[in-house]
Image (cartoon, rainbow, N blue to C red):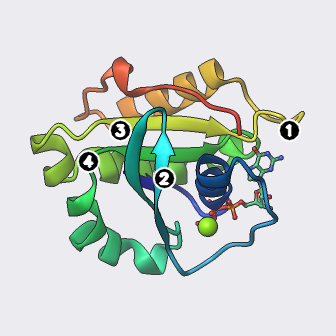
Amino acid sequence: MLIWGPSGAGKTALFYRLRDNSFPKTITSMAQNEDKMLIGNKKVSVIDFPGHQRLRSELMTHQLRRAGKVIFVVDASSLKHELPRVAQQLYDLLTRSYIAESAVPVVVACNKTDDPTAVTPDAARTLLEVELYAFHYFSFNHSYMSHLTI
Ligand SMILES: Nc1nc2c(ncn2[C@@H]2O[C@H](COP(=O)(O)OP(=O)(O)OP(=O)(O)O)[C@@H](O)[C@H]2O)c(=O)[nH]1
Ligand SMILES: [Mg+2]
């Protein structure tokens, strides 16, 4: 399972939350984290891949192909301001041939919903859908959306 999304959205926080049920201080990173962890009653190999633009081609050419599922983490507290950039990143992921042709499930996780400035998961979903529809040639599948608070 691959955790990906914009830099600072909370991917590494989610990785530690899933692995250790902890919430350590994290900083933006250029290094990935990878470990096997128990999710439900299944042992799952999880990769937390940084959101930095410079690592985008490595993600697209190598890491994505290993992913059976993707969690795309967004920061609900900054989504309104970052919307075009976040939607473009999500669009690039969903239209990647490996993801589209292999029907790899992609969940959008709405993080930082504890922040008073955060939009609700429903509002985040609407914002992203509208922005993605604005790309015209894209047909969006509602069932891909979910939400999460760490
Ligand atoms: N308020 C709040 N802060 C959070 C939450 N999750 C993460 N953070 C904070 O957001 C900051 C960025 O979190 P990271 O997990 O390091 O972000 P990232 O997505 O891994 O970022 P990159 O490694 O740059 O791709 C850190 O200061 C976290 O403590 C959350 O649910 N609520
Ligand atoms: Mg990180």
* Residue marked by disc 3: 106
Q: Give the secondary structure at mark 4.
A: loop
Q: Quadrant of ligand 1?
A: bottom right
* Residue marked by disc 1: 115
The residue at label 4 has a CB less than 8 Å from ligand 1: no
Q: Residue furthest right?
A: 116
* Residue marked by disc 2: 37
- The spot of residue 53 in percent (x, y) is 48, 73
Q: Residue at x 59, y 45 (%)?
A: 74
Mark 4 and mark 2 lie on one chain; the one further toward the N terminus is 2
> Would you place residue 29 above or below residue 102 in this image?
below
Q: Residue at x 62, y 77 (%)?
A: 29
C-alpha separation, residue under disc 1 versus residue under disc 4: 31 Å
Q: Quadrant of residue 8?
A: bottom right
Whether the residues at callouts 4 and 3 have beta carbons within 8 Å, the answer is no
Q: Give the secondary structure at mark 2.
A: strand
Residue 137 shows up from this direction: yes
Q: Residue furthest left?
A: 101
Mark 2 and mark 3 lie on one chain; the one further toward the N terminus is 2
Mark 1 and mark 3 lie on one chain; the one further toward the N terminus is 3
Which one is in front in this view, the residue at disc 4 or the one at disc 2? Answer: 2
As shown in the figure, which amino acid type bears the numbered disc 2? Met
C-alpha separation, residue under disc 4 versus residue under disc 3: 9 Å
Whether the residues at callouts 4 and 2 have beta carbons within 8 Å, the answer is no
Whether the residues at callouts 1 and 3 have beta carbons within 8 Å, the answer is no
* Residue marked by disc 4: 68
Mark 2 and mark 1 lie on one chain; the one further toward the N terminus is 2
Which one is in front in this view, the residue at disc 2 or the one at disc 1? Answer: 2
